């Protein structure tokens, strides 16, 4: 396919531009649900006149419907969009970028979506959608899946589905709560994933950041201990990746600890651990949740993070060496490779 695309680019470059433009239109309609022409024109950076002509062509092919409440893809349009994904990856050069990132960090699989999620909420949702597909492909009956919190995990859960009910599966929060938006809490995300798939779930009603004394006390509670044991035995772990100092502020660490983390060269945070440029853990907290040894013992560890601003943090966590699959965007991938 790659050779054929290179030939087409040279012989009929206009065709490739048209294909890319029409794919972008269908893709934006798909991710936006019902959308009006004016809003779509702004999103795909076309004049309304040019967009009107393209929409008429796509409608005539039976790929979308246009009504008074906006546009939506037909079933044929949805199927075509799914069938085009491998072609589009080649067209954007993302397949080659996936291979480079996979080889650079020794990963089993890399999935890259076009764009930069720092600059586009649309790309953030695509990142979540791709993460949902990867998780679905990774699951087997009877799996326990531990999920972290955060905005990327929220977007992943909101788009997750399975073809049949997963009554033998469990979703559990990988850690306690951060005290932030309830939508982004790991408990909420675990319950949402379970509800969307007919699976079961457990919640961990403890704060994420505990003193050593509080940690020892709370781990004596039978109900907490039971959930923690399930979390620590999860076969699949799904996590985000954050900038170290941003996450330290979100976790409301005391100024002395934040300064210590900064001096130790922390660049990234994942699973509640802080990593330096070489992937070495420079700070850890007592938590009723996943520990590093649990990450190391898990069957599949999936990292989902994107944006140019997170590229160095992504590289740092990947150097830690226990992620199997990375889902990121084009900007995050390029920046991670730059820091390899």
Image: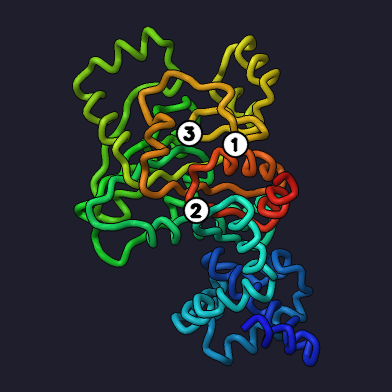
In the picture shown, does residue 332 fall above or below 189?
below
Q: Which residue is mark 2?
A: 325
Q: Position of residue 1 (x, y in %)?
A: 62, 84
Q: CA distance from mark 2 to mark 1?
A: 17 Å
Q: Residue furthest top?
A: 213
Dot 2 alpha-carbon crowd within 10 angstroms: few under 14, some 14 to 19, many 20 or more: many
Along the line of sight, which residue is nearer the eye, 46 or 171?
A: 171
Q: Secondary structure at mark 3?
A: loop
Q: Position of residue 142 (x, y in %)?
A: 22, 52
48 displayed left or right of 318: right
Along the line of sight, which residue is nearer the eye, 120 or 316?
A: 316
147 displayed left or right of 217: right
Q: CA distance from mark 3 to mark 1?
A: 10 Å
Give the residue at x 29% y 29%: 228
Q: Position of residue 242 (x, y in %)?
A: 59, 36
Q: Secondary structure at mark 1?
A: strand
Along the line of sight, which residue is nearer the eye, 338 or 22?
A: 338
In the picture shown, does residue 159 fall above or below 96?
above
Give the residue at x 61% y 62%: 98
Q: CA distance from mark 2 to mark 3?
A: 15 Å
Q: Which residue is mark 1?
A: 242
Q: Which residue is mark 3?
A: 271
């Amino acid at each position: 396919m790659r050779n054929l695309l290179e030939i087409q680019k040279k012989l009929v470059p206009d065709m490739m531009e048209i294909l890319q433009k029409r794919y972008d239109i269908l893709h934006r309609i798909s991710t936006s649900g019902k959308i009006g022409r004016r809003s779509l024109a702004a999103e795909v950076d076309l004049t309304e006149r040019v967009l009107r002509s393209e929409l008429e062509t796509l409608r005539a092919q039976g790929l979308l419907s246009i009504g008074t409440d906006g546009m939506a893809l037909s079933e044929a349009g949805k199927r075509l969009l799914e069938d085009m994904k491998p072609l589009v990856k080649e067209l954007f050069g993302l397949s080659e970028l996936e291979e480079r990132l996979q080889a650079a960090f020794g990963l089993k699989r890399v999935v890259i979506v076009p764009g930069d999620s720092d600059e586009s909420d649309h790309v953030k949702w695509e990142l979540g959608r791709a993460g949902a597909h990867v998780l679905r492909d990774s699951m087997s009956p009877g799996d326990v899946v531990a999920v972290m919190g955060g905005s990327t995990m929220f977007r992943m859960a909101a788009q997750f589905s399975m073809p049949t009910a997963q009554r033998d599966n469990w979703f559990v929060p990988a850690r306690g709560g951060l005290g932030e938006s309830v939508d982004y809490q790991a408990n909420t995300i675990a319950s949402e994933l379970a509800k969307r798939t007919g699976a079961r779930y457990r919640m961990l009603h403890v704060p994420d950041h505990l003193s050593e004394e509080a940690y020892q006390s709370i781990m004596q509670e039978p109900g907490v201990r039971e959930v923690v044991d399930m979390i620590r035995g999860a076969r699949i772990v799904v996590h985000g990746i954050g900038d170290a100092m941003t996450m330290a502020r979100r976790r409301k660490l005391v100024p002395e600890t934040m300064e210590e983390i900064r001096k130790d060269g922390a660049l990234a945070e994942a699973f509640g651990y802080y990593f330096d440029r070489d992937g070495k853990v420079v700070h850890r907290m007592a938590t009723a949740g996943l520990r590093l040894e649990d990450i190391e013992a898990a069957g599949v560890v999936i990292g989902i993070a994107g944006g140019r601003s997170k590229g160095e943090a992504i590289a740092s966590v990947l150097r830690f060496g226990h992620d199997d699959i990375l889902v990121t965007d084009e900007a995050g991938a390029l920046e991670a490779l730059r820091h390899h």
